[in-house]
Image (spheres, rainbow, N blue to C red):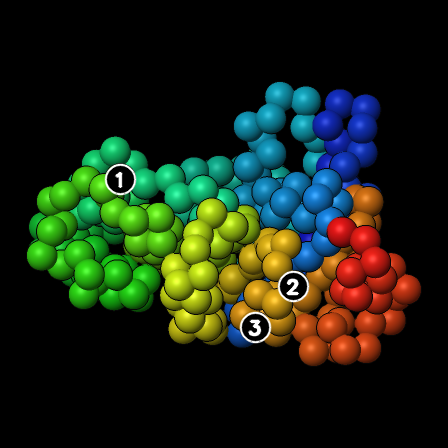
C-alpha cells in the first residue's frame, strides 16, 4: 500500500496532517506514538473504517496495488476483505468457532463446497496457531474461548478471506503476557505472507515484531524507517524523547 499526503479531519479538527508512507509485504510495520497522536486514525484510513464516522473526511491518496481505495468505484466490502482488521478487544461473532472463520469465505463465495470450506477453516486456524487447541470443539461458541484464543480466532477470521494486508490495532493490549507472546510469535510467522501493520503503545513489542517503524506525534508522521534505526539512532529529537521516556 502507498499513502501520499493523507490528512484526516473530524469536522473542523485536523487529526492527521499530510502523512506519506509505503507499506510492503515483506515487512511488519509498527505505528508508535503517544495517545491521541493519530496512529489509529491513520490505520483506519487504510481500509476506510473512517467511513463509519459521520463527520470524518480524508484527503490525499491511498493506493492498494495501484488502485485508489477512495475512488468512487471501489467496493468497500471487497476492500475490507483485502485489507483485514484485528481490533484491540477480541470481538468474535456470537457463533461457533467454525462459523466465525467460515463466515467471510462463505459470503465472499470463496468455497465451492462444504469440503472446500472445511479446508479453509482448518488452514486459517492452523495459520493462526489455534487449530490444535480447538479442532475437537469447532461447534463451541467462539465467545467461550480465553481472551488470547479469541484474538487468534479473530486473526484466523481475517486471514480466511485471503487478504493482502492485515491491520492490527493494539491487538495485545487486553491480553496477559503469555497470550501476548503467542500473538507476537504468530505475527512473526505470518510476516511475508501478508503485509502487516500493528499499532502499539508497547515499544518493546514494536522492537520485537516489526522491521519498519513509524513514529506519530500530534497528527504528524515524525519519522519512518528501519525499526533498529528508529530505536537506536533516531533522526528526530521528538522520536528520541519519546523512545527514552521523556513523554508518552
Taking 227 as reference, is 107 above or below it? above
Q: Which residue is mark 2?
A: 203
- Sequence-wise, which precedes: disc 1 or disc 2? 1
Q: Quadrant of the N terminus?
A: bottom right
Q: Which residue is mark 1?
A: 143
Q: Is residue 89 visible?
A: yes
Q: Is residue 16 left or right of residue 178?
A: right
SS at circle 2: helix
Circle 3 residue: 208
**Residue at image coords 83%, 58%:** 246
Residue at 62% x, 71% y is: 207
Q: Are marks 1 and 3 in contact (CB under 8 Å)?
A: no
Q: Position of residue 224 (x, y in %)?
A: 75, 65
Q: Is residue 181 left or right of residue 173?
A: left
Asked if labels 2 and 3 touch by Cβ distance under 8 angstroms, the answer is no
User: How much space separates mark 1 and mark 3, taking CA atoms?
Assistant: 29 Å
Up the image or down, 165 lies above or below 86; here it is: below
Q: Decide: few, some or many residues near mark 1? Use Cα within 10 Å; few <14, some 14-19, many ≥20.
A: some
Classify residue 243 as left or right of residue 139: right
CB-based contact (under 8 Å), mark 1 and mark 2: no
Q: Secondary structure under badge 1?
A: helix
Earlier residue among tags 1 and 3: 1
Distance, label 1 to label 2, CA atoms, is: 30 Å
Q: Quadrant of residue 65?
A: bottom right
Query: Is the residue marked by circle 2 packed among few (<14), some (14-19), or many (20+) residues within 10 Å?
Result: some
User: Between 86 and 9, which is closer to the camera in this rendering?
Assistant: 86
Looking at the picture, does residue 35 appear above or below residue 164? above
Q: Is residue 85 above or below residue 10?
A: below
Disc on the earlier residue, 3 or 2? 2
Q: Residue 112 location, x and y as percent?
A: 15, 51
Amino acid at each position: 500500500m502507498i499513502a501520499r499526503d493523507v490528512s484526516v479531519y473530524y469536522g473542523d479538527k485536523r487529526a492527521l496532517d499530510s502523512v506519506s508512507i509505503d507499506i510492503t509485504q515483506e515487512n511488519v510495520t509498527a505505528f508508535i506514538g503517544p495517545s491521541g497522536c493519530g496512529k489509529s486514525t491513520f490505520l483506519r484510513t487504510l481500509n476506510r473504517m473512517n467511513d463509519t464516522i459521520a463527520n470524518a473526511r480524508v484527503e490525499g491518496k491511498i493506493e492498494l496495488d495501484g488502485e485508489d481505495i477512495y475512488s468512487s468505484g471501489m467496493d468497500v466490502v471487497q476492500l475490507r476483505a483485502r485489507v483485514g482488521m484485528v481490533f484491540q478487544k477480541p470481538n468474535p461473532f456470537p457463533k461457533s468457532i467454525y462459523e466465525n472463520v467460515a463466515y467471510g469465505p462463505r459470503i465472499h463465495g470463496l468455497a465451492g463446497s462444504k469440503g472446500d470450506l472445511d479446508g479453509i477453516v482448518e488452514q486459517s486456524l492452523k495459520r493462526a496457531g489455534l487449530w490444535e487447541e480447538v479442532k475437537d470443539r469447532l461447534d463451541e461458541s467462539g465467545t467461550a474461548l480465553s481472551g488470547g484464543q479469541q484474538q487468534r480466532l479473530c486473526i484466523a477470521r481475517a486471514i480466511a478471506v485471503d487478504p493482502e494486508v492485515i491491520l492490527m490495532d493494539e491487538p495485545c493490549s487486553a491480553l496477559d503476557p503469555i497470550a501476548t507472546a503467542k500473538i507476537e510469535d504468530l505475527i512473526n510467522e505470518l510476516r511475508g505472507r501478508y503485509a502487516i501493520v500493528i499499532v502499539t503503545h508497547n515499544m518493546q513489542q514494536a522492537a520485537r515484531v516489526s522491521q519498519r517503524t513509524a513514529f506519530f506525534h500530534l497528527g504528524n508522521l515524525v519519522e519512518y524507517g528501519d525499526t533498529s534505526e528508529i530505536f537506536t539512532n533516531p533522526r528526530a529529537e521528538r522520536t528520541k524523547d519519546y523512545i527514552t521516556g521523556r513523554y508518552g
